[in-house]
């Protein structure tokens, strides 16, 4: 359990603090350190008190090292000293070596003013977890002290991590940048596809089949409010006969809101947080979101194209 290159600091001193050792060596198979003095040195020392002193590094790869660890957080390394000439007379003790705390690399975060640590997942805050024991696994426990970020600028939070083998804990300080936040229309659909529809003998409500890009809003001002509106900038028109097709509606909360060339508010909200934008188009279906209403006899066998404009605006608090 001891590294060979750590023997240099080990010395035998007499009562006058003079080094009297001749040679030293490590037998790895028995974990024994041999310290030798010449016979002439021993004769000259006679009844002099000898002290063995020094530091040594543990071999953390030793498979039996973990067996010496105790709940006080220390490795209790057994030490037994004896004289080759009198092997039955032994001095038994132990060396205490503190288990180093696990370590990790912090991942800097940006948060909104007035938000709190409850929005942060500790697993996302620390990487490169390490222990001095190669067979150990480090787990991320929690943010040490929950708090609210009430001041702009730089601060930090502490994340608790723990060794699964020894339960020794460490702390990783994660830098935090606190900002006011902003309101963003993160993305709008590049195209909205209602699919291939049958020519129906009755009124048909066609939900959106798919979009290229999402309709997504992100509000990172903690007390921010907003409204999302839609207007028809180009009506749906057949690409061959140039006839218009149907009416667009937006379903929300049981309401059927008609769209026209004037702005119609279709969604509203508050703080969304920073993890993921609020993607409305992912929630569109037959009862929610954009709907195309086609009257009987209105559709022809051709492709139709139109254009919807989305407008995001701030609502004063």
Image (cartoon, rainbow, N blue to C red):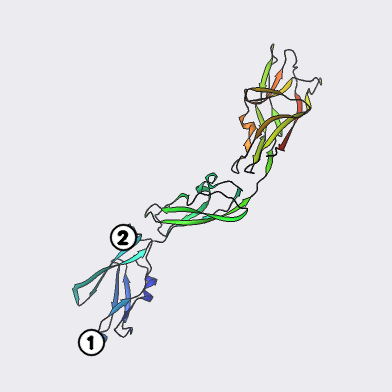
How many C-alpha atoms fall within 10 Å of the one at disc 2: few (<14), some, or many (≥20)? few
Q: Position of residue 112 (x, y in %)?
A: 61, 47
Q: Which residue is label 1 attached to?
A: 43
How much space separates mark 1 and mark 2, taking CA atoms?
38 Å
Asked whether the viewer can see residue 205, the reply is yes
Q: Secondary structure at mark 1?
A: helix
Q: Looking at the rendering, which quadrant does residue 64 occupy?
A: bottom left
Q: Which residue is mark 2?
A: 68
Q: Residue at x 29, y 78 (%)?
A: 51
Residue 59, position in %: x, y?
37, 64
Closer to the N terminus: mark 1 or mark 2? 1
Q: How many marks?
A: 2
Residue 104 seen: no
Q: Nearer the viewer, residue 282 or 273?
A: 273
Residue 271: x, y in percent?
Answer: 62, 40
Q: Which image quadrant for residue 220?
A: top right
Tags 1 and 2 in contact by the CB under 8 Å rule? no
Q: Answer above or below: position of 205 versus 170.
A: above
Quarter that holds the C terminus = top right
Which part of the image, by quadrant, shows the N terminus? bottom left
């Amino acid at each position: 359990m001891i590294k060979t290159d750590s023997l240099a600091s080990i010395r035998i001193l007499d009562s006058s603090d003079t080094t009297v050792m001749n040679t030293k060596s490590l037998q790895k198979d028995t974990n024994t350190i041999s310290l030798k003095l010449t016979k002439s040195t021993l004769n000259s020392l006679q009844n002099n008190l000898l002290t063995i002193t020094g530091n040594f590094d543990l071999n953390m790869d030793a498979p039996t090292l973990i067996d010496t660890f105790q709940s006080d957080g220390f490795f209790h390394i057994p030490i037994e000293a004896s004289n080759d000439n009198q092997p039955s007379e032994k001095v038994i003790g132990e060396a205490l070596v503190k288990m180093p705390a696990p370590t990790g690399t912090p991942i800097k975060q940006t948060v909104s003013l007035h938000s709190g640590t409850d929005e942060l997942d500790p697993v996302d805050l620390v990487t490169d977890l390490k222990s001095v024991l190669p067979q150990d696994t480090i787990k991320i426990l929690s943010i040490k002290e929950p708090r609210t970020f009430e001041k702009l600028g730089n601060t930090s939070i502490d994340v608790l991590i723990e060794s699964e083998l020894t339960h020794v804990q460490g702390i990783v300080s994660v830098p935090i940048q606190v900002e006011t936040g902003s309101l963003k229309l993160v993305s709008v659909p590049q195209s909205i596809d209602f699919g291939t529809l049958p020519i129906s003998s009755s009124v048909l409500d066609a939900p959106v089949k798919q979009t290229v890009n999402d309709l997504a809003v992100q509000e990172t001002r903690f007390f921010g409010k907003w409204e999302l509106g839609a207007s028809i900038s180009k009506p749906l028109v057949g690409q061959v006969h140039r006839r218009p097709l149907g009416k667009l509606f937006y379903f929300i909360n049981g309401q059927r809101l008609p769209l026209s060339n004037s702005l119609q508010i279709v969604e509203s909200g508050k703080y969304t947080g920073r993890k993921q934008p609020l993607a409305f188009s992912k929630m569109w279906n037959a009862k929610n979101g954009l709907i195309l209403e086609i009257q009987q006899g209105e559709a022809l066998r051709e492709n139709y194209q139109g254009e919807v404009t989305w407008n995001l605006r701030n609502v004063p608090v």
